[in-house]
Amino acid sequence: MKPLDLENNKAVKKDPFQLPDGYFENFTTHLMERIPIDEPQVKTTAQPFKTIIRRFRPVIYAAAVISGIIFGIQTYKFQTANDSQTSTEEHETEITAQEANNYVNDFCNFARVTDQDVYTCVNENIQD
Amino acid sequence: MRTPEDKELIKMLADPAKKRAAFEITVNKYSSRLYWQIRHIVFSHDDTNDILQDTFIKAWANLEKFRGDSKISTWLYRIAINESLSFLQQKKNTIDINSPDTDLANQLESDPYFDGEETDILLQKALANLPEKQRMVFNMKYFQEMKYEEMSEILQTSVGALKASYHIATQKIEEYFNQHD
């Protein structure tokens, strides 16, 4: 066999592949039978609903924002009310401790016991 | 660059009322070119027929995604090449003896739709030994006589790279012939 010269060998350039007679005449028909036929009516019935949503979208967004603000304010008020109630409870606790201190002082005065005496007694107990 | 016919066809394809008729025109216009492109990749007529149909069905399904920024032929060619390469990849996954490309070339002698002499068969075997992209470049340039600019759009490769690829492909084919002389 002679060495192949692709640039000058016209015999090789002939395409050896073949196909059945009339292949392309029938191809388009067969292919178009496989292509589904679109049904645009189905789409139009869904459109009014989508159109309504699109139209009222700004209103819906505004309502959501306002609801969020109202909810935020209510939450803040609720939180603030809780905080003041807590501080009141703490104040009551302080008063109770104050009263208890007063009672101790009253007792000490009644029993003629000074703070120094109480302090000395406590220290002795610790050393024991 | 799109021709006036191409622009008109793209307009029709975008119109739901004219889409089907326009697609039929498209199939008539490009089926032959696409057929030969696919045939040179997969060799068998039956496989080519299947892939060609799949190409157009895929094109129909993705018609809305085609924005007309390239030629219709370029877009269709890309789909056809991808389908062909996927087909070869599937064959690679199922056949583990040799390369499926050389296996396909070996079947040419018994293929009723292959009318070639010894030289033609040897050329196809030499092509089957090339990397896929190099083989595509060679087929598009040698058998389909495409311009490098058009090939560049389809294969998304520079003209310079395509010229180099074609030159290397011809050298390898000549070496193959010398070895099997």
Image: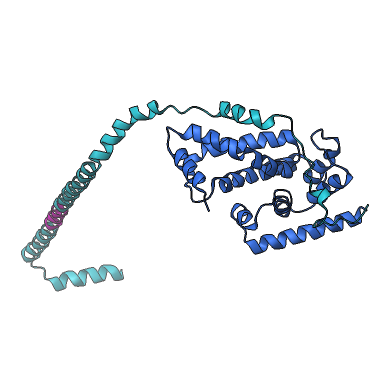
Residue B34: x, y in percent?
65, 42
A27 vs A62, left or right, is right
Q: Nearer the viewer, residue B166 or A127?
A: B166
Residue B61: x, y in percent?
52, 36
Q: Nearer the viewer, residue A90 or A16?
A: A16
Residue A22: x, y in percent?
70, 29
A53 vs B177, left or right, is left
Q: Nearer the viewer, residue B132 or A98?
A: B132
The residue located at (19%, 71%) in the rendering is A119
A18 vs A46, left or right, is right
| Residue B23 higher or lower than B139, as above or below | above
| Number of numbered discs on residues | 0
The residue located at (81%, 47%) in the rendering is B124
Is-magenta flag for residue A3? no
Residue A75: x, y in percent?
19, 49
Q: Which residues are magenta?
A: A83-93
Most frequent secondary structure within the magenta stretch: helix
Which quarter of the image is occupied by the C terminus of chain A?
Answer: bottom left
Picture colour scheme: by chain
Q: Colour of chain B?
A: blue
Q: Which quarter of the figure has residue A90?
A: bottom left
| Residue B55 higher or lower than A68, as above or below | above
B61 vs A5, left or right, is left
The residue located at (48%, 43%) in the rendering is B10
The residue located at (54%, 45%) in the rendering is B72
Q: Colour of chain A?
A: cyan
Q: Which quarter of the figure has residue B153?
A: bottom right
